[in-house]
């Protein structure tokens, strides 16, 4: 018997699908709806109410109606439906209060007054809906509902619920009927949107009778009455019985067969150009100019580095734990600042907590103020998030470096005292990222002083190497990778997916000292490509000449040697070019290192927040102001770096902060 019903349905559905696209359909429908009262009001019209606020509730109500469906095309139909339904419900609010109990002795006891508003609402509405049949018997539709209220009344009561053993209103009743009336200012015309999913199932072979279960949602747009926030949305489940007139069979048409024409030959497949590319290296000189076929000279010199210590720790949105990029130790170790000479500026910055912890341990009378900050985009009305961020830093210094909590003051505030601000709305996320931070300040200038190291350092005559990759037109690249190696050791790699960008990230040799070549063997570089056809291309290796000038070689061959001092000024405030505070002391130190025979290079930089032209002027002003105060304006070599060419990655907040700087290089010959 079960197989019989399956075969019956399978035989009826094809007939139905063929017939349903071009036949008129009329029918009756009925069901039940879940009414969602989206309400927020305390009284209706001029009717007074003691209720603080009536809120959302749900109720059930029946729906009845009729419909007609007119075919528009093979997959679209227009439904006209006339439906009536009940939308009333009961909203309650329990008000906590007090009443006087004077039965034995006068006292005040808690009480609960329940406010209830019961509505009787029924409507009749016209719903024009356009449906689309994506496949099979399923239809989805979207339309409107235009309805008028046929019943619109309400009853409002106030009942003393607790205490249960005594108390009443006037007389002996515990329930006070406030109002029983028509809902004031009832909307004359209710407007809404209708969305539905409907399945039409044939009940006989010619599909003249159909059964259609349906789920629909009505979004109320105008509300029950004007002057109050009260909308009734409906989720309805209905069943429809429909009838379609049986179409008459068309007269057969006899068509003489004609021979099919010969299909044209397929066009030849377009020839794809072979996957290939060329790569060329260019050296970036200290003044920013470029030279093809560069020679990298690695010079071993006595170098002093002075790096600013950014007194900020940045946090993720809504978080109070330190991001993983900050170095955290489980206990105090033999950590010293001297070991930071071989790493770059950002790697030095990521040791901020350990640098400060070591200095606080060495200077026992110094104190530290730890200020947690949040942004306007973070919800922190009581300052708890800002305080948790500051406490995270304090707890690390106490647990790891054994700094007494009495020396660590925790402060919470909203925006930083000197926040980053964005004029362009597109830069607002970058500014917010920089303002989610903890700021450090100390009573002793040694605690946050720049990190100063001295060592024998290998530096490159070419601060950076740029690579240019050329790919012929017509080739779709899905992945690319540029490698630079020496004697098989990988020195530099950059890669990405999609087309090769016009500006490939540069190899910054002056920032990544660990990647400097270690011998006189040439550097080889290649580009590897994948295309959308699954092919891979590896370019022939190109070479960059390398020269090593060690201190021993220079002394043996009597080659002129030199000393290099690099000074990065304390980071400038956002949108600021003035030299003040600790920068004045650093300027005095730089001036003492400059000899008549010294060459001086000054590079000003700015980040990516703001207009490019403005940032270029700001970077130039920083360099010129530094040269003016040093008194080397006529002999200094000035340069600027902004945006993506800044000395540190501008995609992270600390990279942008460190890019607001001036780096002074004093190169003094040793005779």
Image (cartoon, rainbow, N blue to C red):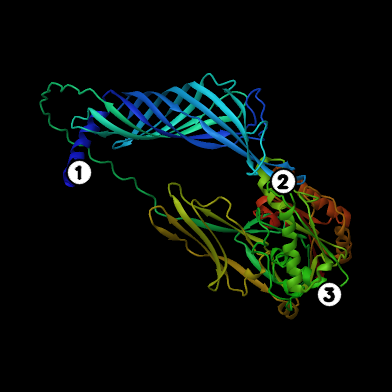
Q: Which residue is mark 3?
A: 362
Q: At x 59% / y 20%, what residue is drawn?
A: 185
* Horizontal arrangement in the rendering, residue 644 relative to residue 370 (left or right): left
- Viewer-nearest of labels 3 and 2? 2
Q: Nearer the viewer, residue 105 or 383?
A: 105
Position of residue 507 in the picture relative to residue 256 (left or right): right
SS at mark 1 in the image = helix
Mark 1 = which residue?
6
For this orientation, the residue located farthest to the front is 104
Q: Whole-Å distance between the Cαs marked 1 and 2? A: 69 Å
Answer yes or no: is residue 560 visible. no
Query: Is label 1 in contact with label 2 (beta carbons under 8 Å)?
Result: no
Q: Position of residue 74 (x, y in %)?
A: 29, 28
Q: Is 550 or 172 nearer to us in this picture?
A: 172
Residue 664, given in percent of the width and then of the height, sits at 79, 60
How far apart are the alpha carbons under marks 1 and 3? 87 Å
Q: For numbered disc 2, what is the local secondary structure? A: strand
Q: The N terminus appears in which quarter of the rendering? A: top left
Residue placed under numbered mark 2 in the picture: 109
Of label 3 and label 2, which has the lower sequence position? 2
What residue occupies the far top of the structure in this picture? 188
């Amino acid at each position: 018997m079960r197989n019989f019903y399956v075969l019956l349905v399978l035989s009826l559905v094809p007939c139905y699908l063929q017939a349903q696209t071009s036949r008129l359909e009329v029918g009756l429908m009925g069901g039940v709806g879940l009414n969602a009262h989206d309400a927020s009001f305390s009284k209706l019209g001029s009717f007074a109410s003691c209720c603080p606020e009536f809120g959302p509730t749900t109720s059930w109500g029946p729906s009845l109606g009729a419909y007609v469906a007119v075919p528009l095309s093979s997959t679209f139909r227009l439904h006209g439906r006339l439906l009536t339904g009940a939308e009333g419900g009961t909203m309650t609010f329990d008000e906590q209060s007090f009443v006087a109990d004077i039965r034995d002795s006068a006292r005040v006891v808690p009480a609960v007054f329940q406010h209830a508003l019961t509505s009787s609402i029924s409507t009749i509405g016209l719903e024009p809906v356009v449906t689309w049949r994506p496949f099979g018997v399923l239809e989805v539709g979207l339309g409107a509902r235009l309805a008028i209220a046929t019943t619109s009344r309400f009853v409002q009561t106030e009942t003393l619920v607790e205490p249960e053993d005594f108390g009443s209103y006037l007389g002996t009743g515990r329930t006070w009927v406030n109002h029983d009336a028509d809902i004031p200012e009832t909307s004359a015309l209710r407007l809404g949107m209708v969305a539905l999913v409907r399945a039409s199932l044939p009940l006989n072979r010619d599909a003249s009778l159909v059964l259609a279960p349906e789920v629909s949602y009505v979004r109320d747009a105008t509300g029950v009455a004007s002057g109050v926030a009260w909308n009734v949305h409906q989720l309805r489940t209905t069943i429809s019985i429909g009838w379609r007139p049986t179409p008459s069979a068309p007269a057969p048409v006899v068509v003489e067969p004609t021979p099919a024409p010969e299909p044209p030959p397929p066009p030849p497949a377009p020839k794809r150009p072979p996957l290939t590319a060329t790569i060329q290296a260019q050296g970036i000189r200290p003044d920013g100019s470029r030279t093809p076929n560069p020679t990298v000279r690695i010079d071993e010199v006595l170098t002093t580095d002075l790096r600013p210590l950014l007194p900020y720790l940045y946090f993720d949105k809504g978080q109070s734990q330190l991001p993983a990029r900050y170095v955290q130790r489980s206990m105090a170790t033999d950590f010293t600042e001297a070991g930071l000479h071989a790493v770059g500026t950002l790697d030095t910055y990521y040791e901020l907590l350990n640098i400060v912890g070591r200095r606080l341990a060495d200077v026992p009378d110094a104190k530290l103020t730890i200020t947690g900050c949040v942004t306007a985009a973070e919800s922190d009305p009581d300052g708890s998030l800002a305080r948790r961020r500051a406490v995270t830093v304090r707890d690390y210094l106490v647990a790891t470096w054994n700094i007494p909590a009495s020396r660590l003051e925790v402060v919470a505030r909203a925006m930083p005292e000197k926040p980053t601000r964005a004029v362009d709305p597109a830069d607002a996320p970058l500014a917010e990222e920089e303002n989610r931070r903890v700021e450090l300040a100390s009573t002793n200038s040694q605690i946050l002083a720049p990190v100063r190291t001295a060592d024998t350092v290998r530096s490159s005559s070419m601060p950076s190497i740029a690579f240019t990759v050329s790919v012929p037109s017509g080739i779709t690249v899905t992945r690319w990778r540029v490698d630079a190696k020496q004697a098989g050791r990988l020195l530099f790699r950059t890669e990405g997916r999609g087309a090769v960008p016009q500006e490939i990230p540069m190899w910054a040799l002056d920032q990544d000292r660990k990647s400097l070549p270690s011998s006189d063997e040439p550097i080889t570089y290649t580009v590897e490509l994948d295309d959308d056809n699954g092919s891979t291309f590896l370019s022939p290796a190109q070479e960059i000449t390398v020269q090593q000038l060690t201190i021993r070689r220079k002394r043996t061959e009597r080659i002129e040697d030199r000393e290099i001092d690099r000074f990065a000024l304390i980071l400038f405030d956002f949108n600021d070019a003035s030299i003040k505070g600790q920068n004045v002391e650093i300027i005095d130190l730089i001036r003492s290192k400059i000899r008549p025979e010294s060459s001086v290079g000054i590079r000003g930089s700015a980040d990516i927040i703001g207009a490019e032209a403005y940032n270029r002027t700001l970077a130039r002003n920083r360099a010129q102001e530094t040269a003016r105060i040093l008194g080397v304006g006529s002999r200094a070599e000035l340069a600027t770096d902004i945006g993506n060419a800044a000395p540190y990655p501008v995609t992270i907040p600390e990279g942008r902060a460190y890019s607001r700087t001036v780096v002074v290089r004093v190169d003094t010959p040793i005779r």
